[in-house]
Amino acid sequence: MKSNNTIAAFHILGTENGALKLNTNKMYHWNIPKRLRKEPIQKGDIVLVPTARGNRRVVVMNVFREEFEETQKLYKKVIKVIERAPQ
């Protein structure tokens, strides 16, 4: 069985009264490198990703498998998991 290799996420703008404030205008996608697939990334995790404005934190909204041969899309890679979602 092949593992999930792509995340869809929203950027975190900051916190407001202890709650995360998200930029929900557009959902962005990143590739999950093989070294991070051992402990799968789940919905709600906060991960560090490269962007045009440097490395930023995002909240994972969806995790799925995407084949390059079918989509022909290359994404930047997730750097690391900052915080796991509570179970």
Image (cartoon, rainbow, N blue to C red):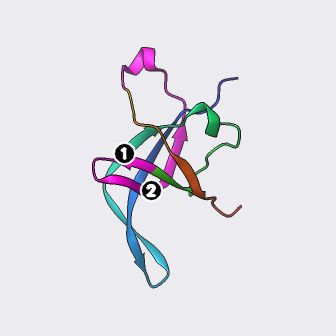
Query: Please, which residue is most extreme toward the top here?
Result: 69
Q: Count the numbered circles shown.
A: 2
Q: Which residue is mark 2?
A: 58
Decide: is 15 above or below 70.
below
Where's residue 51, x and y in %?
33, 48
Q: Residues within 10 Å of mark 1 (few under 14, many from 20)?
A: some
Image point (48%, 53%), residue name: 48
Image point (40%, 36%), residue name: 76
Q: Which residue is mark 1?
A: 28
Check if mark 1's residue and mark 2's residue have beta carbons within 8 Å. Answer: yes
Can residue 36 be found in the magenta stretch?
no
Instruction: Name the amino acid type tagged 2.
Output: Val
Distance from disc 1 to disc 2, alpha carbons, whole Å, reads: 9 Å
Callout 2 secondary element: strand
Query: Please, which residue is most extreme toward the bottom here?
Result: 17
Image point (36%, 25%), residue name: 73
Where's residue 75, x and y in %?
39, 33
Instruction: Name the amino acid type tagged 1.
Output: Tyr
Q: Could you say which disc has been placed on residue 12 in the image?
A: none
Decide: is 66 above or below 31.
above
Where's residue 65, x and y in %?
54, 30
Q: Magenta segment, which residues?
A: 49-73
Where's residue 87, x and y in %?
71, 61
